[in-house]
Amino acid sequence: MIERQYDHPDKIYVQVEATFYPDGRIEPKSFLWDDGRRFDIDRVTDVRRAASLKAGGIGTRYTCKVLGRTAYLYREEDKWFMERR
Amino acid sequence: MFLGGEYVSPKERVILHSDMNNFYASVECLHRPEIRGKAVVVGGDEEARHGIVLAKNYIAKKAGIKTAETLWQARIKCPGLIVVPPNYPLYLRYAKYAREIYECYTDQIEPFGLDEAWLDVSGNDGVMVADEIRQRIKAELGVTVSIGVSYNKIFAKLGSDIKKPDATTLVSRENYQAIAWPLPVGDLLYVGPSTQKKLYWQGVSTIGELAAMPVDCLQRLLGKVGCVLHAFANGLDQSPVARLSQESLIKSIGNSTTTPRDLVCDDDVRILLFVLCESVCARMREQGVLSRTVAITLRDSELFSVDRQDKLKAPSCISGEIADAAMQLFRQHYTWHQPIRSLGVRCTDLVPAGGLQQISFFDDEVNRQRREALERTVDSIRNRFGHSSVQRAAVWADQPLGSINPKGDHVIHPVGYFKDGMKA
């Protein structure tokens, strides 16, 4: 059986560029927002598993600094999503 | 050493029982923000006649909805009820994540279904560990758990049922009489409706009353399980929490299904038995085991159940042989007084394949080996091209019945508490 996916307007699946390190770590470098703008991630300050109540999902949460602001990027198995602000 | 602030001897075990609250419904509500705050149940497929409540959230519970009642009954109790279909792969993923959290505290984890597990955290402050696990599951998985902390598995499980949601309950040697004994006897593991009725006629309605009953009376009344329940009620259960590696020991492999329409004749049963036996045998081959005993379970349209089993002549994982044995059992024990609603096949008494085997002078062993090789080939074709790429001609006689894929749709259910048999 395949896991059914749920759509929600506050859950934005995004295209991500990331570096895969030999030790298995993954560091996201930039993402493409749903309006076509690309944002560079300046720094990842925290990585942990977390639930997103707003978007409805769980995954590995990367706390990212983007243009001086904090943004959460979630890796849900092999897809990435963000919460709409 | 301390168990929730109280001193206990170093040999005393500290056992947690963690139970995810309204598991399926909580996961659905987390993943679908739009249904939060409404009455929600996770329900089976009504068209396939699996239309019962599998799980409910607290709002649905308040409306009086009970697990396992039919969806139409639930809708009458609660107009506007939201019914969502189950998403088992998602629940499996949650169970895996929860386990990863438990593994940070101990390697002695014994799952009981997808949403419950016992953890042996002896040597630690049980309540402190339980509170930490609760907080982590809430933050990392977005659902809540209730945890019972005790010195045996039975009281730990009772404890996890006492305060919900998101709570820790300590059942210690000091307070178990105050906490566990006033509870209804039906809350105890292995006290089902029929045992409850027998106890009721003896004036036993609480766990405390069960504990006070002389053990020989209980044994006369209930047999072997009487001694076990006496030990359970008095907090004397010694069964260990299984270690990670022991969990994989399989006692039986089986599949059952509620059919899209009632079965009315031997041919219907034969088709379904083929489908079920193929799945069971493919799973036995995956696990590298052979079976020596075949059991069938059936339930008629009046929901009356029958369970029968028989030994095989030789250990086997050949679906034709298993299906023949199952069909013979069926013919011996069912007279078609009612149509049949659900059917199951279970292979038990498992032995490792590849070991030494007694072969028979009288059976055609070469032919048996050929049939097994043929089925392995079918397995590999199905693995590559999908379940429906190769099928028996017999299952084409009735498409809705024949197209059931029990192996692909297989979902994990709790195994029995007594994995190694009941020890009184």
Image (cartoon, coloured by chain):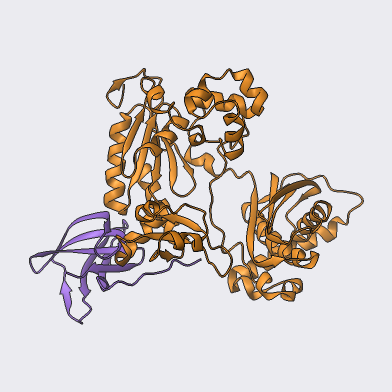
Left or right, residue B237 beside residue B256: left
Residue occupying the far bottom of the picture: A36
The colour with which the image depicts chain B is orange
In this rendered view, identify the residue nearer to me: B273 or A44.
B273
In this rendered view, identify the residue nearer to me: B386 or B302.
B302
Left or right, residue B254 beside residue B119: right
With respect to residue B172, does B337 lie above or below? below
Which quarter shows the C terminus of chain A? bottom left
Coordinates of residue B397 in the picture (x, y in percent): 75, 75
Left or right, residue B252 beside residue B141: right
Left or right, residue B121 beside residue B190: left
Coordinates of residue B351 in the picture (x, y in percent): 70, 44
In this rendered view, identify the residue nearer to me: B130 or B97.
B130
- Residue at screen point 35% across, 45% down: B145
The chain in purple: A
Rendering quarter of residue A84? bottom left
Residue occupying the far right of the picture: B362
Coordinates of residue B293 in the picture (x, y in percent): 75, 46
With respect to residue A12, does B207 lie above or below? above
Q: Is residue B31 visible?
A: yes
Residue occupying the far left of the picture: A68
Rendering quarter of residue B358? top right
Q: Is residue B353 visible?
A: no
Rendering quarter of residue A67? bottom left
In this rendered view, identify the residue nearer to me: B159 or B58.
B58
Count of marks overlaid on the render: 0
- Residue at screen point 76% across, 59% down: B323
Coordinates of residue B172 in the picture (x, y in percent): 37, 24
- Residue at screen point 39% across, 54% down: B63
